[in-house]
Each structure stands twice: as structure tokens, then as C-alpha cells.
Amino acid sequence: MSLAVLAHVAVGSVALALYWTVLLARKGSRLHRRAGKVCLGLLVLTGLSVGPLLLLRAGPFDPGYVVQMTYLTACLATVSKLALDAIRFKTQAEQFRGRLFRTSGPVLLVLGLVVLTAGLLERDPVAVVLSWVGVVYGIAMITFARYRGPLHPRWWMSWHLNAVTGLFNAVNGTFLYVAARWAGIVSEGPGAQVSFQLLTIAGAVVLRLWFGLKFRAPLRFSAATAMRRGAAGAPQV
């Protein structure tokens, strides 16, 4: 195993352990905050560590594979930043949806559509499934950037939860597939990989809905939605 692979596995493993530490920790606690920041930083580093793997990858140069890995790294970095910025700018909505936010949304959407189209043309179910990140977050970011109505008081919690629960798929999907393959539970192939991706996407949706109810953070960002659901008087976390 090359040094680049070892570094990728090591950083990813620590990020995985910290993600579950943050997920299970008391929300808003010192452990939650500190471990969360380190975890998000390591997730971005994990994505960036794919670069050397692309250069050292055996076999002919595959532009499609490079595009897919670049797309996933961009998604990982963007969603991780959303999780941090939602807390950092929770009283400054305009700072949160600043220039970088307004630029990143369309970029993610275009990349997601490119990966989706390529996956459909190449009949690659893995690419089709992975395209959801760019499409969903891209549309959500564009919509939020253009929205100028009153926001519900916990819009920032909604974005934080959108990010950290979405990362549930990024952190666990590939890991579970690799672990199951290593244990001999499944054989290598797109079918098994897609199954684990869909499983963790479903888990991310369940977590988002559950945390949304627990912390009074609806999926929509309008103040009217929050008032209908009684979110206006929810305590800050």
C-alpha cells in the first residue's frame, strides 16, 4: 500500500471516528463544538488527499474518474463549510449567503448535472446516485441566495443540520461498502456500492427529519413556516 493511500485511509478514519463522536455528543457541548471543527477540517483534507491517488492510479488516464473525484471533493468542501458558516453567521444571514455562497450554489448544481448526465450516458449507477449532492445542495443554495423574505429565527440551524446530516452519506457510504467487501459480505461491483450509498442517503434523510423536529428547524427557511410550526419560541442551541 502506497504512502498516499495510507495517508488517505488514516485521515479518513480519524474523520469517521470524530463524525460519530460529534453525532453522539450532547449538542452544543464543548466536545461537540471542538470535535466538530476538527472533523470538518479532516473531511476536507480527506477529499484533497484524493489528488495524489489520482496521479498514482494504475491504468490509463480516465477523465471521467478525475471529474467525479473532483466533484466529490468540491461537494465535501462546500457542505463542510456550510456546517461551520451556519453556526458562525447565525445572526448574520447576509454574511452567510455572501459571494462565495452565491457562487458555490450554481457551481455545485452544474457539476451535479454533469455527473448525472455522464452517469446516465455511461449507465453508471454510482455516478447517478452521487449526483444528488450537487443537484440538491446546488438548488437549495441558489434558492436561499435569492430569497429576500423574512427568515425564520432558526434558519441557521436548518442549514447546519442540512450539512451535517448530508455528510452522514459522505462519511459512511463508501466506508460501509469497503468494510463489507473486505469482510466478504458483498462482492465488488456497482450494485453493492449503490446499495450502501442509498442506505446512507436514507439514513441522512431520517436524521435530518428527526433533528429538525428536535431542534425546531424546518426544511423551509421562511418566517411563516417557522411560525406555523412553533419554531419562533424555540431555545437557541
Image (tube, rainbow, N blue to C red):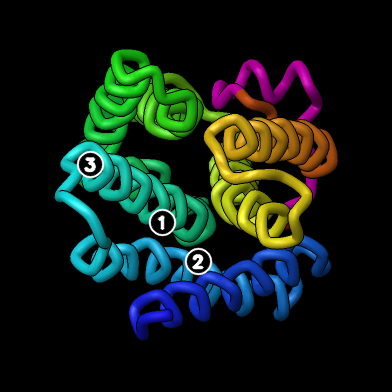
Give the distance between the C-alpha atoms of the residues marked 2 and 3, in whole angstroms: 23 Å
Q: Amino acid at mark 2?
A: Leu
Q: Amino acid at mark 3?
A: Val
Q: Nearer the viewer, mark 2 or mark 1?
A: 2
| Disc with the residue nearer the chain's start (1 vs 3) | 3
Q: On the image, which quarter does residue 195 sit in?
A: top right
Q: Is the residue 120 above or below the residue 172 in the image? A: above
Q: Is residue 164 left or right of residue 67?
A: right
Res. 72 visible in picture: yes
Disc ID at residue 81: 1
Disc ID at residue 67: 3
Q: Residue at x 34, y 78 (%)?
A: 4
Task: Please state the extent of the stretch shown in magenta in the rendering.
Answer: 220-236
Q: Are marks 2 and 1 in contact (CB under 8 Å)?
A: yes
Disc ID at residue 99: none
Outermost residue on the bottom side: it is 3
Along the viewing direction, whichever of 4 and 61 lies nearer the viewer:
61
Q: Residue at x 72, y 35 (%)?
A: 199
Q: Residue at x 34, y 53 (%)?
A: 73
Residue 36: image x %, image y %? 60, 70
Q: Amino acid at mark 1?
A: Lys
Q: Is residue 143 magenta?
A: no
| Disc with the residue nearer the chain's start (2 vs 3) | 2
Badge 3 element: helix
Badge 2 element: helix
Along the viewing direction, whichever of 156 and 152 lies nearer the viewer:
156
Badge 1 element: helix
Residue 165: image x %, image y %? 64, 45
Give the distance between the C-alpha atoms of the residues marked 2 and 1, in whole angstroms: 8 Å
Disc ID at residue 40: 2
